[in-house]
Image (tube, rainbow, N blue to C red):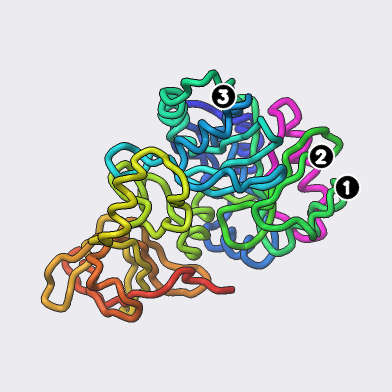
Amino acid sequence: MKTIALNDTHEALGAKMVEFAGYNMPVRYTSDIEEHKTVRTGVGVFDVSHMGEFMLRGPKALDLIQRVTSNDASKLVDGKAQYSCLPNQEGGIVDDLIVYRIKEEEYMLVVNASNIEKDWNWISQFNTEGVEMENISDELSLFAVQGPKAFEALQSLTDVNLAEMGFYTFEIGQFAGVDNVVISATGYTGAGGFELYVPNNVAKEVWDKIFEAGKDWDIKPIGLAARDTLRLEMGYCLYGNDIDDTTSPLEAGLGWITKFTKEFTNSEALKKQKEEGVTQKLIGLEMIDKGIPRAGYEIMDADENVIGRITSGTQSPMLEKGIAMGYIQKAFAKVDTEVIIAVRKRRLKAKVVKFPFYKG
C-alpha cells in the first residue's frame, strides 16, 4: 500500500486511515456529518494527494488530448481547466479527468488515483506523434481547501486575488512562500474553494501554513467519507460507482463534455447513440419513505419489475433524507416519477429528482 507525503501528519491528527485506491488515506478525523457541515458552511481541507497528474508537452500535445478526450480542449486558453473523460472503444469510460492548459504546448491532466497506470497506458498507446509525457503523480501533493470561507482563509498566503478567480480557472504563483504552486478554482464538493498542487518536499510546510492562516475561520481537516457525501449531494459522478468502463458518457448525463465537433475515441458510435437516444439514464433519487439507499440496491416500478440499480447512495447530512444516484430505464427517468427501492426485504418509495440534490 502506498502512502501520501503527509501520512504521519494525518495519523498524528487522529485520523482513521483506510486503504483507498492503493493508498493509505484519512477517511475521517471526527465525524462524517460534522466534517460535511464544516465544508458546506465554513472551510475544510482534504488531502487528496493520491490523485494522478500527467504532464503533456510539445507541438502535438493538444492533438493527443483531442484524440483521447471527449471534450473540446481546443477551447482552452492559458489558465483555464476543463472537465472531460477518456472514452474507450466499447462505448464506456476509461476515466474522467481534468485538463489544465498551462501554456500553448504544455498541459496537465489530473486523473483518478485508482486509474493512474490504466490511464497512462491508455493515453500512451495513442501517442504516435512524439508528445513528451511525464507522470508526476508521485512528486506532488494536492490539497483541496473547500467551503464558502476558503478564499478568506487562504488569501493572506498569496498575492493571487482568489475572490476574483472564476470556476475552473487557475493561476501559477507563489503560495505560502512556495513558488510555482498551481492554485486552481476547482473542487468536488459544490461548496466553492481551491485545489493546490505543491511539491512533496514542501507539503508539510504548506499544510501547516494553511491551518495557521485559516484558524480565524475555524478551518478543519476533512476525510474522504465527507468528500463522498458532499459530491453525492451535488450529483457528481464517482468513477467506479456511477461511471466505469461499461457506462456511456451520454447515459451518465455527460453529454455536455462529449463534443462531436472533432473526432475522438469511439466518437462515431457515441454520435450514433446520441442520435438514436439512450435506453438508460443516470438519475437522482430522493427517498419518500425513511431509509438509506445504497449502491447495488435495485430500483423497481410499481409492479416490482426491476428497472434500474443504484450506483451511489447515502443519508444527506444537509437534507436529512436518503438520496441516491442510479441508472434507470429511460421511460422512468422523468422528474417526479415515483419508484420503489428494494432495501433488503423492504420496499421503500422514492422519486426522481434533478441534480443537484442540495441547492445551498
Q: Position of residue 141 (x, y in %)?
A: 65, 34
- Per the image, the residue denoted by label 2 is 173
Q: Is residue 204 magenta?
A: yes
* Distance from Cα at disc 2 to Cα at disc 3: 22 Å
Residue drawn 72% across the image and 45% down it: 79
Left or right of 77 on screen, residue 125: left
Q: Is residue 17 left or right of residue 196?
A: left
Q: Earlier in the sequence, mark 2 or mark 3?
A: 3
Label at residue 135:
3
Which residue position is annotated with label 1? 159
Residue 119, relative to residue 289: is it above or below? above
Q: Are marks 2 and 1 in contact (CB under 8 Å)?
A: yes
Q: Amino acid at mark 1?
A: Asp
Indicate the quadrant where residue 190 lies: bottom right
First of labels 1, 3 by sequence position: 3
Magenta residues, start to end: 195-220
Q: Position of residue 246 (x, y in %)?
A: 28, 45
Can see residue 49?
yes
